[in-house]
Each structure stands twice: as C-alpha cells, then as structure tokens.
Image (cartoon, helix red, strand yellow):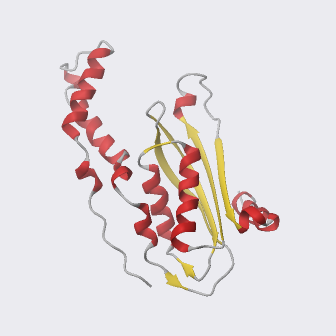
Amino acid sequence: MTAEPKPANPECKVDKPRIERAVREILAAVGEDPDREGLLETPARVARMYAEMFSGLHTDPSIHLKKFFTEEYDEMVLVRDITFNSMCEHHMLPFYGKAHIGYVPNGKVVGLSKLARVVEEFSRRPQVQERMTEQIANLLIEELDVKGVAVVIEASHSCMSIRGIRKPGSLCVTSAMKGLFRTNLSSRSEVMTLIYGAH
C-alpha cells in the first residue's frame, strides 16, 4: 500500500474577478443591464460556479490511484452508476449522467470511492463525453496496470435538449474497452450484462 498525497484546493487557481468582468460584458452584449438589482450579484455567482465546475483543470486525477492494496484477486471489480455533472466545451452547457467502471486487477486494487473521485475530477473541466471516457480508461491502465478496463458513460446533454435540435430525453452512450475487455468477447459480454442486466 502506498501513501496518498493530499490535494490542494483547485478553486484557488481560478481568476474569479476576470470571470466577473466577462459575465458583465456578456450581459451587456445580450441587451441586459448588468447593474439592475436582479443581476448585480450574478457575475460573482457565475464566477464561483465556474471555479467549482472547472476545478478539475487544476487537479491530477491520478493522485487517487496512488494508494492501492496488493491483492491476488483476479476477477472483475465493477462500480456502477457513478453520477457526474460536466460542462460541454462546445457550447459551455452542462451534460450529466452516470459512469460505470469495471476492471480486472493485476495485483492491485483501489478503494471503490477512488474510482468515483477519478470520474469527478475528469468531469470538472470543459469536456466532451468521448474524451472523458477514454481518459478514465487510460488512467486505470497507466496507474494500476490492470488486465482489462471497461468504462461506459451514459449522459444527457443540455446543448442538445434546450437549444439546436431540442430533443430532451435523448441519451448519449460511450464506451472504452481496454485489455481483456477488448480482446475477450466473453469478458466484454460479462461486464455489459453486469452494467445493464440488473437495471
């Protein structure tokens, strides 16, 4: 087992005054009065929100996989239904959903909450779902040297539901299969059954 470093507060690295100035400009640009009562504190609120939503830009998700336990267990570990919220980098609108992570250990296992923390930190940055799915899978391969990893993400995108095509209720599903889950069809079938079979 290795020690886990303590992360710093990532929100301290965000330039909130600069965000506030930008939000005032946006409000003026759309024809609003940034100085009217209902909008006076909006720039500060948005700055605090962005500091929270984009805190993952200033963190290293691998820190959560540095502490592991040596175990001979060599069957699948699956954490299902890890909820997350992220921000689509194309329209700066939220997308949100669930991540499912399965892996086959190669002598190392991590606390289950660490997988949720990895999802959280990758989600808290301007993102696209496809990249986030790959990032999570690749990190487990790199840090834990797992025999296989499967990441499936299901998400609703507000950039598709409240603007443009306006199709609420649509769901985007992405997957990344590495190692055993890519080369062994029965392993891939098992993880997909465990993810969806009990729903």
- Residue 92: x %, y % from top left: 43, 33
- Residue 58: x %, y % from top left: 33, 53
* Left or right of 74 on screen, residue 128: left
Q: Quadrant of residue 196?
A: bottom right
Residue at 44% across, 65% down: 62
Q: Quadrant of residue 108?
A: bottom right
- Vertical comparison of 99 with 148: above or below: above
- Closest to the observer: 115 or 58? 58
- Residue 156: x %, y % from top left: 58, 40
Residue at 56% across, 44% down: 129
- Vertical comparison of 26 with 15: above or below: above
* Left or right of 94 on screen, residue 133: right
Residue at 25% across, 45% down: 14
- Closest to the observer: 155 or 72? 72
- Residue 44: x %, y % from top left: 22, 35
Which quadrant is home to the C terminus? Answer: bottom right
| Residue with the most extreme top position | 31
